[in-house]
């Protein structure tokens, strides 16, 4: 009979669980709705702020940008080193040929015929290598014109701009997320609600913020310094900048005097408002065109680690779109530009 009583107890318990199932499910749904209403999302047994997931994506994007920046810088560095190595070898080979020819010219008469022929053989053996080096090497100041330099520096610029923008966005977002987690932990109703979901359910600690900050510090070290990459395209030196702390752009660098300018598309993209009473002027292009422009100021223009403020520029009309964006020595104000083309860079410093 004991076995019968046990069986009946089990059946009764099972029936109670089955009958209570909908009630438990309904209660869980209410708890989950409460948590989601507080901006939390479920990840396994943890409940995280949606901002935490956004920051995780941005942190991953930052990490990828840092790796790609390292690779692109490595390509640029190798290109510079290889070009210097080839250039040095070319100079040594030419010097060797010159010395051998001088020795040969000093030898005359039949008795020196064999020696002259040996010197000529040495000269001839060096010529193929010299020809190969002349094809491979670029004059140091022309290295920035090479396709490989263009590709590497373009990637470096893109990743540096990407990192700069993430460095601007993420610190304040991390701070706000930490404060939000702290407030949630002090919310007894919310913490009790999480407990109703089971012993494994818990609120995320917000500890990811430490990892995010480590990645920010690493990224910040990657882009600190006065030197910015430079390459030459269609005869013009090109550098990267960020307009108004938010809009990446590529500028033509024009040494010397003259105005800086922005095409209409960049003005729109940067969200720059042209005052209705902005001063008007006429800009004369190299091809003879005369373009009506409005004189405005960029509040912030970032070139590498240097932040220029109140930069006066010409806002070009749509028909001047082909001119692109330009910065000049004159428009740099108190900053100076120092070109180092053999190393594909330019220094901007006060």
Image (cartoon, rainbow, N blue to C red):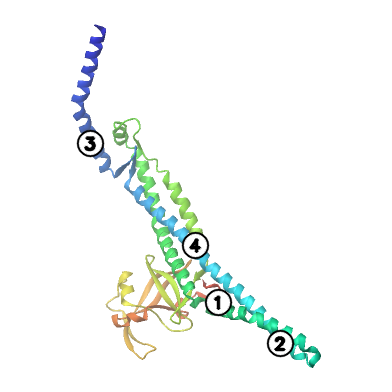
Q: Position of residue 161 (x, y in %)?
A: 42, 65
Residue nearer the viewer, 123 or 22: 123
Based on the displayed image, in which of its 4 quarters is residue 206 positioned?
Answer: top left
Cα separation between marks 1 and 3: 69 Å
Q: Earlier in the sequence, mark 1 or mark 2?
A: 2
Q: Position of residue 142 (x, y in %)?
A: 53, 79
Residue 178 location, x and y as percent? 39, 46
Could you tell me residue 304's position as x and y percent?
47, 67
Q: Residue furthest right?
A: 111
Dot in front, 4 or 1: 1
Nearer to us of marks 1 and 2 is 2
Q: Nearer the viewer, residue 259 or 218?
A: 218
Residue annotated with mark 3: 29
Of label 4 and label 2, which has the lower sequence position?
4
Q: Is residue 220 above or below residue 87?
A: above
In three-dimensional space, the C-alpha distance between marks 1 and 2, rounded to whole angstroms, equals: 25 Å
For mark 2, give the secondary structure: helix
Residue 39 image-quadrant placement: top left
Sequence-earlier tag: 4 or 1: 4
Q: Are marks 4 and 3 in contact (CB under 8 Å)?
A: no
The residue most toward the bottom is: 109
Q: Which residue is mark 4?
A: 71
Question: Does residue 126 lie above or below 26 as drawn?
Answer: below
Tell me whether the residue at label 4 lies in contact with that at label 1, contact meaning CB atoms closer than 8 angstroms.
no
The local crowd at label 1, few if under 14, some if 14 to 19, many if 20 or more residues have their Cα within 10 Å, is: few
**Could you say which disc has been placed on residue 136 in the image?**
1
């Amino acid at each position: 009979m004991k076995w019968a009583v046990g069986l009946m107890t089990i059946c009764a318990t099972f029936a109670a669980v089955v009958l209570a199932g909908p009630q438990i499910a309904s209660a869980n749904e209410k708890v989950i709705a409460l948590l989601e209403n507080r901006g939390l999302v479920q990840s396994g047994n943890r409940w995280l702020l949606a901002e935490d997931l956004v920051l995780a994506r941005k942190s991953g994007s930052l990490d990828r940008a840092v790796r790609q920046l390292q690779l692109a810088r490595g390509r640029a560095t190798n290109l510079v080193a290889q070009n210097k190595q080839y250039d040095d070898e070319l100079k040594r080979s030419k010097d060797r040929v010159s010395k051998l020819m001088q020795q040969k010219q000093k030898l005359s008469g039949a008795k020196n015929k064999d020696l002259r022929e040996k010197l000529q053989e040495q000269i001839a053996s060096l010529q193929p290598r010299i020809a190969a080096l002349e094809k491979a090497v670029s004059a140091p100041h022309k290295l920035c014109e090479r396709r490989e330099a263009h590709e590497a520096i373009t990637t470096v610029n893109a990743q540096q701009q990407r990192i700069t923008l993430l460095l601007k966005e993420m610190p304040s977002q991390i701070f706000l997320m930490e404060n939000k987690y702290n407030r949630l932990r002090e919310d007894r109703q919310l913490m009790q609600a999480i407990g109703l979901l089971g012993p494994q359910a818990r609120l995320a600690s917000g500890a990811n913020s430490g990892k995010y900050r480590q990645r920010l510090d690493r990224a910040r070290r990657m882009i600190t310094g006065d030197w910015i990459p430079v390459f030459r395209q269609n005869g013009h030196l090109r550098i990267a900048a960020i307009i108004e702390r938010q809009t990446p752009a590529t500028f033509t660098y024009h040494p010397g005097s003259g105005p800086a300018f922005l095409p209409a598309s960049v003005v729109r993209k940067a969200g720059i408002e042209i005052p209705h009473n902005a001063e008007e002027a006429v800009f004369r292009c190299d091809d003879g065109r005369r373009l009506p422009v409005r004189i405005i100021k960029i509040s912030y223009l970032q070139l590498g680690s240097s932040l220029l403020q109140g930069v006066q520029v010409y806002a070009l009309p749509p028909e001047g779109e082909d001119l692109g964006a330009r910065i000049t020595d004159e428009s740099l104000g108190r900053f100076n530009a120092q070109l180092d083309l053999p190393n594909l860079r330019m220094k901007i410093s006060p």
